[in-house]
Image (tube, grey):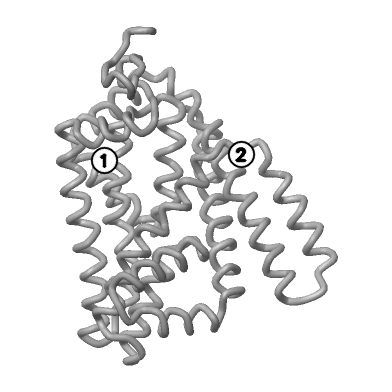
Amino acid sequence: MSILQVINFFGGLALFIFGMNKMSDNLHAVAGTELRRILKMLTNTPIKGVLVGMSVTALIQSSSATTVMMIGFVNTGLMNLSQAVGVVMGANIGTTITAQLIAFNIGNYAFVFIITGVVLLLIRKSRAMERWSHIIIGFGLLFIGLNVMSQAVIPLRESQVIRDFMVQISANPILGILTGTLFTMLIQSSSASIGIVIVLASNGLIPFEGALYLVFGDNIGTTITAWMAGIGTNYTARRVALVHTLFNAFGTTLFGLLTYFGVYTMLVNRLTTGRCLFGREYCPSCSEWSHLF
């Protein structure tokens, strides 16, 4: 992998993070005070809190933003801990919509979103229209960044050293989870780190099980934002950050074990027909691996 390809990879990552932040910030601005009102009013029961947290995070595309708002509300006494816990749990579900958007193969149409956003920006008639323009541009930049990263890592498929390194990480659940955790803590975006995992997996550099361990680690690493937001707040507000971390850590432990013993991967293969590490195709109807390839 040449220096230029390394630069392209990190340039693509920068575009991805910039697009994600632009989209998230403007979605958050569009929702504005109405979003805060909904969070305060509709979280009187844990189930409602989960649903609200899931919906809000899917809307603003950032579980970190939702969690930071919860810490702020608890710190000022607008919400109690039990209300915030439900929303934080829902936020962890809502944030998966970002990964699903990344997984959709619409990267070839990224410039359509860029063109649309720029045109709307040029003819904007209001502040709201300007924000929606930035949202669309951010969405396009997200996929352009993914495309650039994907092209940059193609040469790595020919490197036996890199392949062996990736397989080593994938084969060790603890190492995979730790790698995902540290990388997400570093870039402070689980969506970006999951995007990189998808790029690596789609280029055959990392197997499915290894990708799962990295994603599990990403979910722990993303809690660093909540801890940073909790600096200087009261004890109850900091407990929101603790709940966020414990929820993701327990989830990672549970599903990491299920993946290690093959239970979770088997469930996923039953839901979506796929191939195992050896190129065999799984048939959900007969629950067997057929040697078709």
Residue 169 coordinates in the image, percent (x, y): 25, 33
Local crowd size for mark 2, using a 10 Å CA cut-off: few (<14), some (14–19), many (≥20): few
How far across and how far down the image is residue 60, in percent?
Answer: 51, 65
Tell me if 131 is positioned left or right of 262 in this view. Answer: right
Outermost residue, front side? 285
The tag earlier along the polypeptide, 2 or 1, is: 2
Q: What is the number of the mark on residue 106?
A: 2
- Name the residue located 57 percent from the left edge and 75 percent from the top edge: 31
Residue 56 visible: yes
Query: Residue at point 37% right, 83% down?
Result: 72
In the rendered structure, are the residues bearing label 2 and label 1 in contact, judged by CB atoms less than 8 Å apart? no
Q: Quadrant of the C terminus?
A: top left
State the residue at coordinates (32%, 8%): 291
Residue 12 in percent (x, y) is at 55, 44
Amino acid type, residue under disc 2 in the picture = Ile
Residue 8 appears anywhere in the view = no
Q: Nearer the viewer, residue 263 or 284?
A: 284
Helix, strand or loop status at disc 2: loop
Percent from the top left, x then y, of residue 203?
A: 46, 27
- Please, what secondary structure does the residue beneath circle 1 have? helix
Q: Is residue 23 above or below residue 149?
A: below
The residue under label 1 is which amino acid type?
Tyr
Q: Is residue 59 above or below residue 269?
A: below
- Residue of label 1: 213
Query: Looking at the image, which residue is at 34% across and 60% down?
Result: 92
Measured Cα–Cα span from mark 2 to mark 1 = 26 Å
